[in-house]
Image: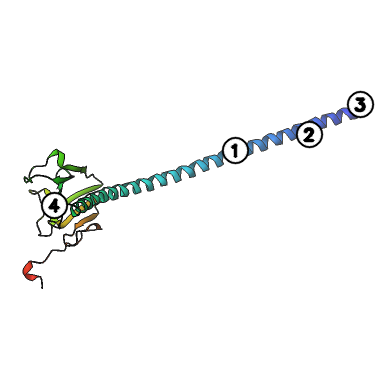
Amino acid sequence: MPICSAQMHTEARDSSFVTRGSSDERRATSDGFTLTELIVVVLIVSLFVLLAQIHLFGLLGKSTFRAQAVEFVSTMQMAAAAAAESNRRYEIIIDITEQNYVLRQITSTDLSKVLEEEIIVENEFSNNCRVIYVLFDDLTRTDEDYQIAKFRVGHSGWQAGGKIVLLDSNEKEYSVVVNRLNGIVALEQGNAELLVPKPEDEVPF
């Protein structure tokens, strides 16, 4: 009887060893799968973050052009609205060489001088929104020698109409069109066709 009991005890210990060994193997296998899954998840998340950043940078570039172009248009609209509601005159000066523009209220008869106290808005264009040339509705345009364009507006409207052609960071053209017939200033895609007023002798009565 004691011998039989000893053998049974030994078998029990062997069985316990096998059980523990199987449990350790399962735990090791389970740990290996968890690590692999973690690596896969990290890679997937990293890919989504990269795609989101690329998309975000693209949107920021576009919105930067849009924001600057809309701000420029709003400045011109503000000048026209303020002039229409008063007897004051305003001038938007666009400097292509310096890539900036100024809105001022005209307070003196000497239009060649811009007084510091006349300046209402002073802003710059950027690489995301560049002005390349200005064409007036009398077909006068900026060139290498003529790099400054001026739009004046008073109570009766714009002194001259025209278009300001802009480029975004992808070299895509946009036009800010100033219509002196109806006073509207609008941003349009592409190099917009400019409506040139007819001479007085061609206008029917």
- The residue identified by callout 2 is 15
Q: Position of residue 91 (x, y in %)?
A: 14, 49
**Above or below — where is 160 with respect to 124?**
below
The residue where tag 4 is placed is: 152
C-alpha distance separating marks 4 and 3: 118 Å
Sequence-wise first label, 4 or 3: 3
Q: CA distance from mark 3 to mark 1?
A: 45 Å
Q: Earlier in the sequence, mark 2 or mark 4?
A: 2
For the question of whether residue 50 can be seen, the reply is yes
Residues at badges 2 and 4 in contact (C-beta under 8 Å)? Answer: no
Q: Earlier in the sequence, mark 3 or mark 2?
A: 3
Which of the two discs, 2 and 4, sits closer to the camera? 4
Three-letter code, disc 4: Arg
Q: Nearer the viewer, residue 101 or 19?
A: 101
The residue labelled by disc 1 is 32
Residue 156, quarter of the rendered image:
bottom left
Quadrant location of the C terminus in the rendered image: bottom left
Instruction: Name the kind of residue labelled 3 in the image.
Output: Pro
SS at circle 1: helix
CA–CA distance between discs 4 and 1? 75 Å
Which residue is found at the position 24% from the left and 48% from the top? 129
Q: Are marks 4 and 1 in contact (CB under 8 Å)?
A: no
The residue sitting at the front extreme is 86
Q: Does residue 123 sit above or below 187 in this rendering? A: above
Residue 16 higher or lower than 172, as above or below: above
Q: What SS does tag 2 mark?
A: helix
Nearer the camera: disc 3 or disc 1: 1
Q: Is residue 168 visible in the rendered structure shown here?
A: no
Disc 1 residue type? Gly
Residue with the mark numbered 3: 2
Tell me the element at label 3: helix
Is 110 on the left or on the right of 125, as rendered?
left
